């Protein structure tokens, strides 16, 4: 019987798949991250036809109608609401308001790259609404200890040591964008946990949810402005209007002022020092005194 040489290409491909699978399984244990399940609060018009967009620290399902978005010129953003489940895990309405504002602000600044943001739903071609479905609280005491260790070690190790892989928080959100006639042009159910490498520890029960709220707003707005998945491809340089807004400047459209301005450099420094987001983020104007909540 002739000797059969092994198929090296198949062997190498199999080896890579095994290594990738092992890394995905071990990643939470290597870097420390919170696993947050996808939650549905039944606030979307439809959950059908959603594609998977899972990542190492993210779970997501989404759909976007690129052709329908071509006709959109103006966008209205409803204030993000909080489900009853999410409310159970956070005691203070002011903490929840920090997270909702982070989402609203990121959405508003993000869609401004392509659309005109207006302050009236009646005058908008597209309306966006989001619901926080779960907040996994951050252990503020452990976050404070992590910050102290990292800052203390920065004199010896550049950048300090990673955050302690304990007491990490998380966030899950669902959102959709609908046309004037009620058609769903985009939808997303999203969940992500903080991790010890890329999420700064902040001494606040919503420290991680606050940071992740900005991440969700960026992802959903990117999907709307590009008409495709926001989870693939290389990051692009931010636009000038986005940079100005991120550093606390005036947003491109007046309608975005409803959600307040980003804390800018002060917020960045506070984040590195582990300070609560409430110390630098003054949130939305006083016109949003009432906390909108989902009914289910």
Image (cartoon, helix red, strand yellow):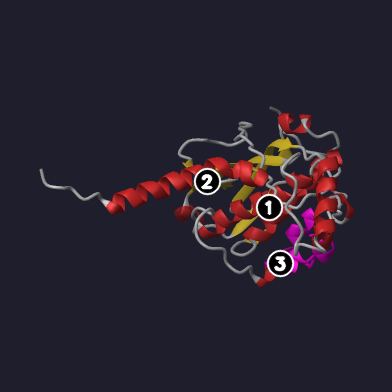
| Local secondary structure at mark 2 | helix
Mark 3 or mark 2: name the one nearer the start of the chain: 2
In the image: residue 10, left or right of residue 259? left
Check the image and name the residue furthest to the left: 1
Q: Nearer the viewer, mark 1 or mark 3?
A: 1
Q: Residues within 10 Å of mark 2 (few under 14, many from 20)?
A: some
Seen at 65% across and 47% down, the residue is 31
How crowded pointer 3 is (Cα within 10 Å; few <14, some 14-19, many 20+) is rated as some
Q: In the image shown, does 127 or 206 lie closer to the viewer?
A: 206
Query: Can residue 185 be seen in the rendering of this structure?
Result: no
Q: Earlier in the sequence, mark 2 or mark 1?
A: 2
Q: What is the quadrant of the C terminus in the image?
A: top right
Query: Alpha-carbon distance for marks 3 and 2?
Result: 42 Å
Where is residue 156 drawn, in percent x and y? 80, 63
Q: How many marks?
A: 3
Quick one: SS at disc 3?
loop
Horizontal relation, residue 39 to residue 99: left or right:
left
Asked if the stretch drawn in magenta spans residue 219, the answer is no
Q: Quadrant of residue 134?
A: top right
* Mark 1 surroundings within 10 Å by alpha-carbon count, few (fewer than 14), some (14 through 19), many (20 or more): some
What distance separates the C-alpha of mark 2 from that of mark 1? 15 Å
Name the side, left or right, on which 245 lies relative to 287. Answer: left
Give coordinates of residue 75: x percent, y percent: 63, 55
Q: Write the residue at 72% across / 29% down.
A: 85
Percent position of residue 135, x then y = 73, 37
Query: Which residue has dot 3 on it?
Result: 252
**N-terminal-most mark, 1 or 3:** 1
Q: Which residue is mark 1?
A: 197
Q: Which residues are the magenta region?
A: 242-266
Quarter holding residue 253: bottom right
Circle 2 is placed at which residue position? 23
């Amino acid at each position: 019987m002739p000797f059969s040489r092994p198929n090296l290409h198949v062997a190498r491909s199999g080896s890579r798949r095994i290594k990738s699978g092992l890394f995905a399984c071990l990643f939470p244990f290597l870097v420390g991250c919170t696993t947050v399940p996808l939650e549905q609060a039944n606030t979307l018009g439809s959950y059908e036809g959603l594609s998977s967009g899972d990542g190492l620290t993210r779970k997501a399902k989404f759909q976007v109608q690129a052709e329908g978005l071509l006709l959109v010129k103006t966008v209205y953003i409803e204030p993000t609401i909080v489900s009853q489940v999410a409310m159970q895990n956070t005691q203070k309405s002011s903490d929840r308001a920090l997270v909702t504002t982070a989402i609203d602000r990121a959405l508003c600044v993000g869609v401004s790259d392509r659309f005109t943001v207006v302050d009236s739903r009646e005058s908008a071609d597209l309306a966006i609404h989001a619901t926080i479905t779960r907040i996994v609280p951050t252990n503020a005491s452990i976050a404070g200890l992590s910050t102290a260790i990292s800052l203390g070690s920065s004199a010896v190790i550049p950048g300090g040591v990673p955050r302690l892989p304990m007491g990490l928080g998380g966030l899950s959100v669902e959102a959709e964008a609908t046309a004037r006639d009620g058609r769903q042009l985009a939808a997303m159910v999203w969940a992500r946990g903080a991790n010890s490498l890329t999420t700064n520890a902040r001494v606040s029960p919503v420290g991680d949810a606050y940071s992740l709220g900005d991440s969700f707003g960026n992802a959903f707005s990117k999907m709307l402005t590009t008409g495709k998945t926001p989870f693939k491809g290389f990051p692009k340089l931010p636009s000038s209007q986005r940079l100005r807004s991120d550093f606390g400047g005036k947003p491109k459209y007046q309608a975005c002022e409803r959600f307040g301005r980003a804390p800018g450099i002060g917020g960045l420094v506070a984040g590195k020092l582990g300070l609560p987001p409430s110390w630098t983020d003054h949130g939305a104007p006083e016109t949003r005194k009432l906390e909108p909540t989902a009914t289910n």
